[in-house]
Image (spheres, rainbow, N blue to C red):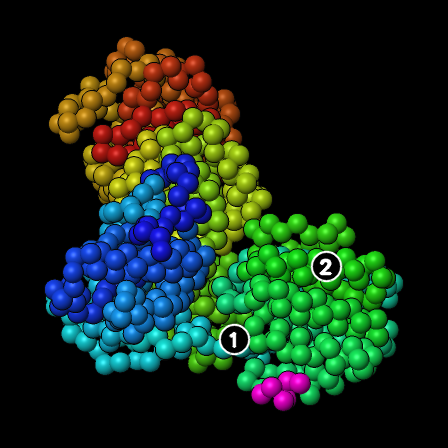
Amino acid sequence: MTSSIVVIDPQRTGTGHWPVPEERRTVTVLFADIVGSTGLVDRLDPEDVRALQRAYFDTVAGVLHRWQGVVEKYVGDAVMALFGARHSDGFDAYRAVRAGLEIQAALDRRPMVGDIRLRVRVGVATGEVVVDLGGAVSGGHGVASGAVITTAARLQEYAEPGSVALCAATARATAGLITQRQLAAVPVSGRVPPMPVWHAVGLVRPGTDRHDGPLIGRRRELATIRDQVSEAIREHSPRWLSVVGPTGSGRSRLLHELTRGLTTVDGVPVRWCVATCQPYPDQVLAPAADLLRGLAGVRHGDGPAVVHDRLVAALTSLFPPERVAAAVPALQRFLTTPDSSSAALAGAAICRDVLLRLAAHQPLIVAVDDVDRAAPAMSRFLHALFSTATARGLPLALITLHQPQWADTRPSPARRMTIGPLATVQSGRLLRHLLSRAGQPVTLADRLLPLVGGRPGHAAAYVASLVDGADPAALPLPEALRRVVGAELDHLDGERRAVLMAAGTLGGVISGAAVDRALGWTPGRSAPALRGLVAAGLLLHHRTGGYAFAAPALRQVAAERLPRALRAVFGRRVADVVGLDTVHPDVVRPCGDPAGAGRAAASGKAVRRAEGVPRAEVVPLEAVRARNSRLGTAVAPTNRLDAVFAVSPSDVSRHRPRSPTVTTSPAASTRGTDPRLRRLRVVASTGGVPPTRESTTVTHAGVPRAPGTDRASAAILVVPAVPGSAERTAPADVEGPPGVVRALPRPPVAQWADGLAASA
């Protein structure tokens, strides 16, 4: 027996590169402890205690390693493990519950050392923590912090000996995968109301998804697949089609429609054999066994006699009698235990031969859904099937459905078809249908439309959350969707994940320069990562330049992964340099209250132009310095000015000239201000009419002014800009809607003392 008590997971021990060292993550915590350990230790000799602890810890650590858990700490006889601490596949809670059930099966009432038998309680809880990514390895103490750790420990205390207790979030995450039994809620100190508890009973036998609603969209994809399959069958040239799309894109629904609609090719009946790869199957060749079950009509739970008779009936027309007699027992064993044993591999070879013989008699389509979950043995099975069918020239088509990141090396004739998002009109129709069927207000479709990102699965998740009691006013991100999107994010390495999280904090269109500034990187460093995110289907090229998120939920999850402190740092870095190309008059106060303007703009609250302050005003640099001195902020010396311009729409309507311009001449720009200040040219647009020399007159101090206007048309706040930018000064642009002033090109900017970046 080995004496090691800490198992290191090679997939999680690489130091890697984590530009964002900590993340807020939803993890599942498993807490296991021995029942009555104190009395047991008191009765045993210290050497026996040591031997018992080694056997116990080795058993528990081995199970946790198998299910990709990270041992966070040992507390006496208790073990605490994290699932999803650094990487998530969307099934963290499922893996934790499977590990808990396996620990109980390995330890409960079984002799460990001599005749000593142990009883163990296990608690499993799911919730949000802050994780140190660099330390998220087995044996890394203090990796995670959050209330869910205490919850798991409390659940373990309330669990029955030999059982696995679940919190509500874990029960929801494993519904449909784990058989559960709800218990009475238990009181927990410091928490109101009492905590609901479930016990995990066992595994749920996999079933098929229901697809009972109308298909909306996907007509082009269906037609493409039909054409490819029909051509392969018609020409006896096997074809492998890879249908690629992220979770929630509707891959399974597309397969369902194909099996229903494609039943003949040129009048010849087509036979379908369909299987789905379940998450973490106990037997690696279970999908191949499901193909055989579908072919022979064998159901789960059928007795040995029924299985024998149906296999004989299916094989009689394909093999001679002596071959049938030899193959049926091997296939029965294969259906019982489709693992990686030599007997199972022999049964898989016979199953493959059955499929090939069937294709020689009748056109055959083999489809495997979620093949990215398949074990390597199943992938080898499919490759051998396809290569043999190609060599024999059989009318066979192989369709695999998987996520974009699946890295299996498909045969060269394979054709890849990517499923994109639904069109906006199609998403709206789908939402209205789902809401109507669920008894929810159809008017919610307009608010849900920008949240689902064209993914049917996201639409279904939002509607299901409303049925379960989600607040229709807030429309929070559903838990199921958060798990799926988090898994998409965790397929990335540390650098691309950091880029995506930084992009999530930026509003509007994402630029590489803004991402570099947020992360504190040198310009251009994020460009390769951004291109990789586009290739992975997580970002899209925006029509105006830059990038946009492929799914709104992905932006939300990526941003929420960042701790609050990092979010604030990223925001400050970007705000320090983002210029105000366009300043709307309803978010900047006039010059009578410049400090208030800065505070209002920094907080994002709109402040209307004050009545009675219509006069344009130039604030001397000394006044700005005095204000900054009062606020405790220094202003660096500079050779030019930056300005924020605001023109009230009401003022524009009162003083609308025929050729509206308000321009500051080079000579007037330095009067009454610091001699170091250079010229400032400003155009206040009141209708997008370009300025002309003939349309201006000269006002006081040599400032040109349009006929019929007065100095009350604009409020100007003058603040110093960064040194060295005067050479890039250019006339302002006048294009834009009334009431908006644009200044181009955008130079580097200074930071307002109260947080408002200004640019002219």
Q: Residues within 10 Å of mark 2 (few under 14, many from 20)?
A: some
Q: Is residue 404 above or below residue 18?
A: below
Q: Residue furthest top?
A: 675
**Numbered range of the magenta stretch:** 303-308
Residue type at tag 2: Ala
Q: Separation of disc 1 and disc 2 at Cα?
A: 26 Å
Point out which mark residue 495 bears.
none
Residue 307 magenta: yes
Point out which mark residue 384 bears.
2
Work out whether residue 575 can be spotted.
Answer: no
Nearer the observer, 671 or 698: 671
Work out whether residue 117 can be spotted.
Answer: yes
Seen at 50% across and 22% down, the residue is 693
Q: Is residue 688 above or below residue 219?
A: above
Residue type at tag 1: Pro
Seen at 48% across and 70% down, the residue is 460
Q: Which residue is mark 1?
A: 206
Give the x, y percent position of residue 212.
58, 79
Nearer the observer, 736 or 368: 368
Earlier-in-chain disc, 1 versus 2: 1
Nearer the observer, 236 or 470: 236
Residue 287 left/right relative to 355:
left
Seen at 45% across and 57% down, the residue is 89
Seen at 51% across and 33% down, the residue is 527
Nearer the observer, 260 or 290: 290
Give the x, y percent position of residue 692.
51, 25
Residue 301 left/right relative to 696:
right
Q: Is residue 180 above or below residue 635?
A: below
Question: In the structure shown, which secondary structural element does the residue marked by tag 2 occupy?
Answer: helix
